[in-house]
Each structure stands twice: as structure tokens, then as C-alpha cells.
Image: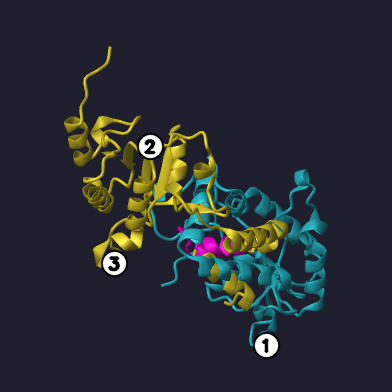
Chain colours: A cyan, B yellow
Amino acid sequence: MSFSPLIRQLIDALRILPGVGQKTAQRMALHLLERDRSGGLRLAQALTHALEHVGHCRQCRTLSEEELCPQCADPRRDDSLLCVVQGPMDVFAIEQTGYRGRYFVLKGHLSPLDGLGPEAIGIPELLVRVEQGVFEEVIIATNPTVEGEATAHYIAQTLASSDVTVSRIAHGVPLGGELELVDGGTLSHALAGRRPIDL
Amino acid sequence: MSFSPLIRQLIDALRILPGVGQKTAQRMALHLLERDRSGGLRLAQALTHALEHVGHCRQCRTLSEEELCPQCADPRRDDSLLCVVQGPMDVFAIEQTGYRGRYFVLKGHLSPLDGLGPEAIGIPELLVRVEQGVFEEVIIATNPTVEGEATAHYIAQTLASSDVTVSRIAHGVPLGGELELVDGGTLSHALAGRRPIDL
């Protein structure tokens, strides 16, 4: 067996989606063809349109089909705060917290072994943005991974000579769950970062 | 927040895929736009082509862009066996076992509450196929669920007057795993269906 060629091509094409293996791709392809052709057509059209029209925001480098993304275009946001993240998905995550400053979106993290230096991930553009803006604080919200920490450290060093405050999001125990399940590294950070209790 | 409209449309469109919720759809959309635009384009094209050209095999009703699917078109397969399944995915599963007879693909299972009677799932076409063929045995391989069993039972009754043998795939303990983890219903079937050991 032996799906027919067009179905096989569709299955192969679906496998580029993150987290989708052979079996899931088969289920998706047959679902679209067997049960939801109109949905499939909408998907093909939405994908084509998005690929044709979505580029990067001129200011923060997140994905956007306008020259300025909704966050950069909004005049009511706080121009004194700049949050630096690794990707467009992180903008979404930070927005959920109620943060209403500005953003700068890197292209991932520094990874010298993969040839990704400061230029490749957009740090020169970040410096330009900081120089042109009226930011009082740059909040570095790269991932809490080794690479994310290294990237945060590099940016902090690079911005040391400017007159903005550079901060890093706090490491500590996440809300919910139990202390005994938290890894040692996180717990060390949580202890070291302890704060007086406001009464 | 506030993805831009085209990205939001793409995320909504991706959610029609089985097993894909809001968060996965976001990850997929941003992955396609940020990291794999050529793959995204291939996906959109493969999907469009498949939706335009893939229909159903004239004989077995599985998905196929040819009038006859590869299984029906192959002259070397056993014309005395017909395997009845609930969907195209099941053809793939049965093919893996080495079965080399013919197929008939229903449109799911009987579901009177949803208004899906024998006509809706293609049982009249199955009868025509059995009458026109030279089958000696019809193997009913609908799912081992309540609905699948009911559908199998209905088909067996309908074919009772014809001169083909009607069989049902065996129920029993699956290979691998431990007996204590097998549910009671399956174990009852396995006991009732016990067979002498060939030495």
C-alpha cells in the first residue's frame, strides 16, 4: 500500500508541521479529504494568503502583514518599556500577562555552533531600536534555557554603555504544583531571588 | 493581542485539523511563517491539488484520484476475498498485515441517532459490489466499538441470503502488554474465542 500519489504528496507536505509524524499526517490528510473539504480549501487559501502577505513589522520584527504590527501601531502603549523576546509566539505569551509596553522580536537565540551570531538573530537592529526610542527599561524575556540565558547576557553587555536599565524576567518556582517536583536549578534561583513579604 | 488578521485566519483554519487546538495551531502557523515558508507553500499546493483531484474509487469507494484505486486496479489481487472497512485509513491498516484481497470502504458506521442509516454509509453499494463480484468470503473489519459491531451485525444479516461466507475479524487480547491490563470485555471475547494449540 499505496495511497494514491496526490494523497501521498499531501501526507508528506503535512509532515512539515511541527509535532506531526507519519501517522498524524495520514489522519489529517484523510480527515480533510473525507470529512471536511470546505475546511481544507479554507486552510489552503488562508495559508497561501498568509505566505504571500505576511512579512515582518518594520519596528519590532514580529510577523505582520502591515508595515507596523498591532502592538507597534497602538499609540496608547507605554513607550518607556521594551520587551525583547525570541520569537512572535513569545509576544503572544507576554501579551497575556497584561504587559502594555513595546516589543522587539529576535530571530531565535545566539547559537555559535549553528553559525547564528548577533547579526543573524537581529541584535544590531535591536541596538538601533533602543537608540531611536525613548525607553527607560529593556526587559529581556528570552527563554530560560542555556542559549536564552547566554543571549540575554550578551544583550545586557551590549546595552551596558547605554543609559537604559536592562532587566531580566525573574527565575523561580512556577505557580501551582509542588515544590518537591521543581528541579534543583530552578529552586536555587528561587532561593537566591527571594524577596521580603509585603504585609 | 492581537495577531494580525491574516495570521489569525491561518490559525483558525489550522484548527480544523484533527487533534489541533488553539495553541498547536498558533505554533504551526508561526512555524510555517517564520521558519518554513517553502514547506508552507508546498503544503498549500498539495492540499489544493488533492482537494481538486481526489475523489472516490468507483469500485471500493476509498479515496483515489484515479477512477480505480491502486488496490482495485491491481489484477494480481485475490478476487475471492472482500474486506469491508469503515474508512480509507483502515485500508492502510489492513494492507500492513499482508492481506491481498479486495476492499469495500463504508462511509463510517451506522448511527441512527445522527441520521446515518444503511444508505448514508453505502451499504446498498456494498450489496451491488458483492453481487457483481466473485467473492467467496466477505470479511467485516469495522471497528471493535459498539457502533462498529452493530454495523457488522447489520451487514452480516443483509448478506445472509447471498451465497458468500460472511466473517468478522477476531476479538481477543492484543499482542504485547500484560493480561492484567486488558479490559474485561476483551478478555471475555478472548476466552470465548479460544482455539486449540497447533503443535
Q: Are marks 3 and 1 on the same chain?
A: no
- Spatial CA span between label 3 and label 1: 52 Å
- Spatial CA span between label 2 and label 3: 31 Å
Q: Chain of mark 3?
A: B
Give, as a single range, the part of the protein colored magenta: B17-29
Residue that appears at 56% across and 58% down: B54
Identify residue for label 2: B81
Which mark, by number, is residue A75? 1
Marks 1, 2: nearer the viewer:
2
Is residue A44 placed above or below B191 in the rendered structure?
below
Q: Horizontal and vertical percent for residue A136?
A: 71, 76
Marks 2, 3: nearer the viewer:
2
Where, by quadrant of the figure, is residue B26 drawn?
A: bottom right
- Give the amino acid type for the residue marked by disc 3 in the picture: Asp
Q: Chain of mark 1?
A: A
- Give the amino acid type for the residue marked by disc 1 in the picture: Pro
Residue that appears at 32% across and 47% down: B143
- The local secondary structure at tag 2 comes to strand
Residue B129 within the magenta-colored segment of the rendering:
no
- Give the amino acid type for the residue marked by disc 2 in the picture: Leu
Residue nearest the observer in this picture, A38 or B164: B164
Residue nearest the observer in this picture, A61 or A53: A53
Q: Is residue B13 visible?
A: yes
Residue nearest the observer in this picture, A158 or A32: A32
Identify residue for label 3: B114
In the picture, measured across the screen, residue A160 lies left or right of residue B169, that is right
- Spatial CA span between label 1 and label 2: 71 Å
Q: Horizontal and vertical percent for residue B65?
A: 57, 55
In the picture, measured across the screen, residue A199 lies left or right of residue A113, that is left
Which mark, by number, is residue B120? none
Q: Are marks 1 and 2 on the same chain?
A: no
